[in-house]
Amino acid sequence: MTLPLSAIRPCLEGAVPAVIATCAGDGTPNVSYISEVHYVDARHVALSFQFFSKTRQNVLENPRATVVVAHAETGAQFKLAVHYLRTEESGPLFECMKAKLAGIASHSGMTGVFKLRGADVYRVESVVEVPGTASAIAATEPVGLADVRAAMARLSAAGDLAGLLDGLLEELQCRFGVSPAMVLMHDPARGTLYSVASRGYPQSGIGAEVRPGEGVIGAAALAGIPIRISHATSEFGYGRAMRHDAERRGATAGIDGEIPFPGLPGSQSQIAVPILAGPRLLGVLFAESTQTARFGYDEEDAFATLASHVGAMAALLEEGGETHEEPAGPLRTLASPAGAPLRIRRYAENDSIFVDEAYLIKGVAGAILWRLLRGHTEERRADYTNRELRLDPSIRLPDISENLEARLILLQRRLEERCPTLRIEKTGRGRFRFHVRRPVLLSEVLR
């Protein structure tokens, strides 16, 4: 009896190598192992093309093959009759399989040996159980649609971007038992992703950056699809330092700061899901675990659904934020603060801000902070609107996809963690107050 391909998705995780049988053009059979059988959709799988082997030659001569996959826990085996269609050497499917293969290689001690050349896409013509093997796949507790629905209802009630992102991480932890996790937002002007919300890490890592293509997070951002690995892999880890362009050029060595990526020591499973608004990348949802194979297809589907909802909600909040901003009203001035002065230095090249020689923030968020500090020292200014920041040329917001709200969240949380003497307090829709509790001495490096 033919089974639906979806019924054996747990067998397609790569924990047990699959077997593929092919025939040459003259009918000579060949059997070999294959590292990865990847679920594409209800009628297609993709097999990892790693070597120019006899299997590869046979498939090009005769596109029909038989693949046997096994369930890692029960030993149940299933036979797939497949028909070769094409090979993809780049794109979302290739990047997803590349990440997964790196995890398989690391787990099996084959790092440096396994290299994905292409993703061979096959049409699945039938799926049957191999007689004599275990008759049932081990029961696992699925991610319930009711939980996804309840989480989406909670997120729909968010009144601003900060509440939306914090609510997402809280739902993952409380409803799905997933922690640690973080949300990174996309900065299209600099081509990076920066963390604005996290949960479950000893250090929050707010402001830590990842480039598209770097690690699981960067791969998901670049490909625009979920990336999930079940075993630790150095290729898709974040242990190495991530240095910025200015330092690599040597033009401003030493001025740029680095916020360490928090990371989970002993991380074995990772999942990264892009947050999209239509075709536009807003950010990435990332979670990890010390447990191998912690995230399966159910979690991937649930996280992708929630990320899609967050993307739509974020776009609505962004679109309606300026329209519904409260009027500026009378601006408030504050009394002069007392105490030892806070020495704050700005590097104009990339708006890096240092407080008492310690790196705080850079980029657009750094430019915003510098604008607020100048307003404090020159005008005794305290109250601001998002609208005026958008229109301020000194901040140099990108023309498109500026996502000011995310940058304000980043700045507010970095100040809370690293410089509580300075504080941003939201006072209404599109309005906030800047508090300075000590005198400040400002200096600039313009080169």
Image (tube, grey):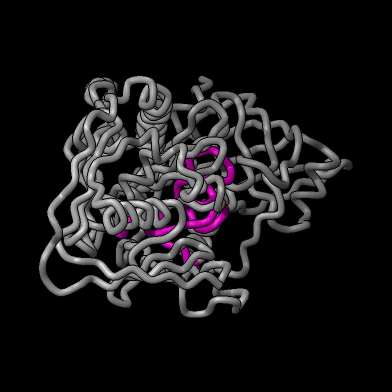
Whole-percent x and y of residue 152? Answer: 28, 23
Question: On screen, 212 above or below 255?
Answer: above
Q: In this view of the protein, which residue sits in the foreground, 277 or 405? A: 405
Question: On screen, 188 above or below 245?
Answer: above
The answer to whether residue 206 is left or right of residue 75 is left
Asked which quadrant contains residue 213, the reply is bottom right
What's drawn in magenta, residue-wise?
Answer: 205-234
Q: Residue at x 12, y 54 (%)?
A: 335
The answer to whether residue 117 is left or right of residue 15 is right
Asked which quadrant contains residue 93, the reply is top right
The answer to whether residue 260 is left or right of residue 421 is right
Residue 145 counted in the magenta span: no
Q: Residue at x 58, y 42 (%)?
A: 223
Q: In this view of the protein, which residue sits in the foreground, 70 or 337? A: 337
Residue 225 counted in the magenta span: yes
Question: On screen, 265 above or below 87?
Answer: below
Q: In this view of the protein, which residue sits in the foreground, 197 or 384? A: 384
Q: Which residue is drawn at 42% across and 30% down?
A: 311
- Quarter of the C terminus within the rendering: bottom right
Whole-percent x and y of residue 206? Answer: 31, 56
